Image (cartoon, grey):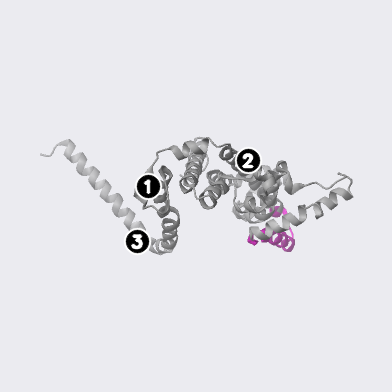
Amino acid sequence: MPSAKANASAKDIGQVSFKQISFFKRLWQQKQLALMSVPMFLYICLFNYSPLWGWITAFMDYKPAVPLFENEWVGLKNFEWLFSRTEFIGAIRNTFAMAAINLVFGFVFPILLALFLNEIKSLRFKRTVQTVTYLPHFLSWVIVVGLAQNILSSTGAVNQLILSLGLSKTPIFFLGEGRYFWWLVGGINVWKECGWNAIIYLAAMSAIDPALYEASEMDGAGRFKKMLHITLPGIRSTFMVLLIMNIGYLMEAGFEIQYLMGQNVVMDWSQTIDIFALKYGITKGQYSRAIAAGIFKSIVSIALMVSANITAKRLGEDTLL
């Protein structure tokens, strides 16, 4: 007679086979969705995963003219070089500072805009405001930066308004003083993306049961209390998922706006890790050090997203993983 251990093993094999069969059965039942996801899967494999083999050059003294595996292996020397450079430490500081400002502004203002639009009764006015606010999303960063430079220049509209109101006797050099740069990047990002990001919250608000609002009105709740006790809790799960995703992208403070607006006089405030990698990888030809900087950014991003996910799970909120 078979032993208990053999019976248990056979049972485990049967469970595994059942799980595998059920998975492929579900996959076949959803074959249309699976086929639709194939182009995106190939895109991710081609542009996100296949380039990862190049990470090995961060551990070499890489020279393009030399065959890949004939380059000298240097271990962690490129990473040691990075953290010995005050320029790279400054790039980390700038990246985190601008990313934090974008994270806060990118959540507060879209939610406020969505709450405002959700309370508008006139459908025509609501659609007009929504269209005007999300149209900047479709403008390229070159156009946006050009508009910002014209508006914020010494003779621009902002300085003319400040002078006319008597708030300053001389024009303020917004584009040439580093202390303004981080906040300008945050403000420009809000103007460009606020309306587009508000669409997600409006969609989440539309899923809230209208009976909750009717019941609150019967209890004497006004608009503010309905927003505070019904609308905001109703979009909490959407907010948490987006927050985790954005924390994962915290190291993506931006590239285009910093590169286009980062003049030499504000370089200490505008240079991010991406610009640092571009500078040393393309301009100076130090590819190994540039890739090492990119690896550092990717590892920190993964760590931040996992930490945010674990924290949200412990708090009982919706998570990604």
Precedes in sequence: disc 1 or disc 2: 1
Graded by Cα atoms within 10 Å as few (under 14), some (14 to 19) or many (20 or more), the crowding at tag 1 reads: some
**In this view, the mark in front (1 or 2):** 1
Pointer 3 residue: 28
Residue drawn where x is 27% and y is 47% of the image = 16
Circle 2 SS class = helix
**On the rendered image, what quadrant is the N terminus found in?**
top left
**Mark nearer the viewer, 3 or 2:** 2
Q: Please name whichever residue, 165 or 79, is drawn nearer the observer in this view of the structure.
A: 79
Expressed as whole percent of the image width and height from the top left, the position of residue 271 reads 61, 45
Q: Which residue is mark 1?
A: 71
As helix, strand or loop, the secondary structure at mark 3 comes to: helix
SS class, disc 1: loop
Q: Provide the residue designation for mark 2.
A: 97
Q: Is disc 2 surrounded by few (<14), some (14 to 19) or many (20+) residues within 10 Å?
A: many
Q: Is residue 273 left or right of residue 268?
A: left
Q: The magenta stretch spans which residues?
A: 117-139
